Image (spheres, grey):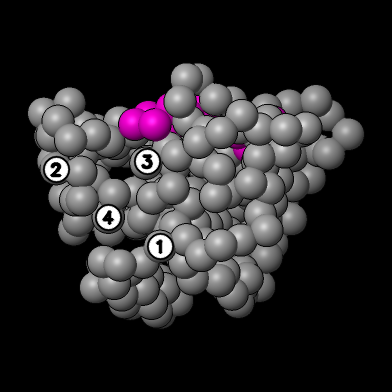
Amino acid sequence: MQFWVIDLDDGFRDEAEGRHVKLENISSIPMLALWAGITAIPWRGPPPVNARGFLSILHEATTNPALDPSTRSSYAVRNYFMISKNFCSLHSRFGFYFSIVEALVSERAIENYISFQFKGGAADYQRRVRRAFFVGRILEEFGFRTEVKEDALFSRLEGQEEGFMKERLRIIGYLIIHTRQLDMIMLDDASISGQKAKITKDLHSLLETPGLLIPNSPIRFSH
């Protein structure tokens, strides 16, 4: 994964030298919380796909011109953060779906909010819609308001204290990574149930580890 970082004001602890900024030099509270969720649990790769799921992906890849790697499209955008100490906006593409996170996290609970949305996928329309509802139901269990329009999910949480918001950003970070390619199995009830159980277990594990911090890391972000 490659990420670009735009420092809006005080998102870095010190002036970055060269083209890269190290993780430990980032001071953005919401970005660090989001990144903790992104990196907390390694992704195991795509779920096993049955024949119908595979054919759905093959058909979509051959009929949707936006998925053609030789075609300029929004699928080719970079992953980037815009940050300050209390603000973060993430625009990312993983596989064939997009996600956008915007968050303000500070000591003033009344001003705090998280907005999360994603759309797209490589499977057929019905599977993409079902994935949006699948993720929406998970977010509702953790206090988010959600709305699904076609294959796009929109969710929001606001007015909570800083620690609570940081926990919810971990959840968002986890879901960005671990719900990619789940559209492929969204007509298989047994697979859906298994994925729901695993995700719910992982998320509760994240919340039960309040001291989870990002270790010193060689990760560098372009800026």
Q: What residue type is labelled 1?
A: Leu
Could you give the CA–CA distance between mark 2 and mark 4, rounded to whole angstroms? 10 Å
Tell me the number on the disc at residue 167: 4
What residue is shown with label 1?
Answer: 213
What kind of residue is marked 3?
Pro
Number of other residues with Cα within 10 Å of mark 1, as a class: few under 14, some 14 to 19, many 20 or more: few
Say if the magenta span includes residue 80.
yes
Local crowd size for mark 2, using a 10 Å CA cut-off: few (<14), some (14–19), many (≥20): some
Q: Which of marks 4 and 3 is nearer the N terminus?
A: 3
Looking at numbered disc 2 in the image, what kind of residue is underneath it?
A: Glu
Label 3 near label 4: C-beta < 8 Å?
no
Residue 213 lies in quadrant = bottom left
Q: Which of marks 1 and 2 is in front?
A: 1
Magenta residues (range): 76-88
**Tag of residue 161:** 2
Q: Which quarter of the rendering shows the C terminus?
A: top right
At numbered mark 4, what does the secondary structure look like: helix, strand or loop?
Answer: helix
Q: Is mark 2 on a helix, strand or loop?
A: loop
Of label 3 and label 2, which has the lower sequence position? 3
Instruction: State how far apart marks 3 and 2 are (Cα).
Output: 13 Å
Disc sitting over residue 30 in the figure: 3
